[in-house]
Amino acid sequence: HQLWNCRKTAEAFELSVVKEIGESRSAKTEFTREGFNEMIELCKKKKVDYIIADEPKRLSRNNIDTSRIIDLMDKKCIKGVLCTSRVYQSENSRDKFLLQLDLSLSKMDNEDRAKDIKDKMITCLKKGKWVTQAPDGYRNITLRKGHKDIEIVPERAKWIQKMFAMRCEWYSLSKIAEILYAEWYRSQSWKKVLHEQIKRKLHNKFYIGIMEWGWVEQVGKYPTF
């Protein structure tokens, strides 16, 4: 749908498309977006006149990439940015200011939504509920629409229990990995267990009945091993 909107925008301004670039990574990340970096390089080489995007927030939701786009406009590497909602011309200082403002608002909106999610997670945590992916040995279940829970998976749980039991007997991580890998590999249930995976499980407080999110800890309502 976004690509179709960009094509229609190009047609409306009677522009030929130099290259269509898709991006799989979120616009809130910087430097890691290969498509975005390719677009910036094309603009620096002055091989395009306009950047066409469905919405400003699809271009950037972080300060670094926003500054890279504005810099292209300041240096007249591009004539402007075309979006379905409005046009931002490089020669117009007001347009550049509005683009920077729109991109900054996108970043703020993204941060606000992230904060809302975090607040909801903490609220659920304080009620003794865990709403994200259950750790190994448990699984997420749906009781009814809008109501979820977690239950123990016996076949998985026994391996976690064995891991903790061996550690209590002062087995090294290498020895635990050796024993569990041999048994799990033969049963075709899990892939090779790495030391770091074992270490993460042994440090996961969920298994002893304590749920942790950020700096918040709460006693859980779920059965422990």
Image (tube, rainbow, N blue to C red):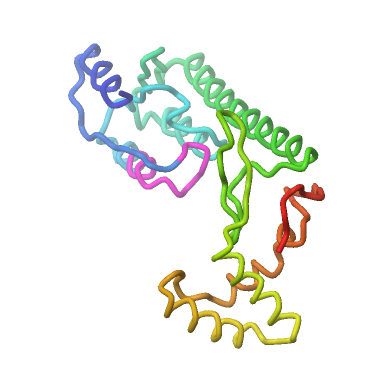
Who is closer to the viewer here, 148 or 19?
148
* Residue visible at 77% across and 43% down in the picture: 128
- Residue 88 point in image, percent of width and height: 42, 17
- Residue 158 point in image, percent of width and height: 61, 70
Left or right: where 55 falls relative to 157? left
33 falls in the magenta region: yes
Left or right: where 183 falls relative to 12? right
Work out whether 191 lies above or below 152. Answer: below
* Residue visible at 65% across and 34% down in the picture: 117
62 falls in the magenta region: no
Work out whether 112 lies above or below 225. Answer: above
**Magenta span:** 26-40
Q: In the rendered view of the protein, which quadrant contains the N terminus?
A: top left
Work out whether 187 lies above or below 58. Answer: below
Q: In the rendered view of the protein, which quadrant contains the C terminus?
A: bottom right
- Residue 150 point in image, percent of width and height: 63, 47
User: How many numbered tags mark residues here?
Assistant: 0
- Residue 106 point in image, percent of width and height: 55, 26
Left or right: where 76 falls relative to 158? left
* Residue visible at 60% across and 86% down in the picture: 174
Quarter of the view holding residue 63: top right
Quarter of the view holding residue 49: top left
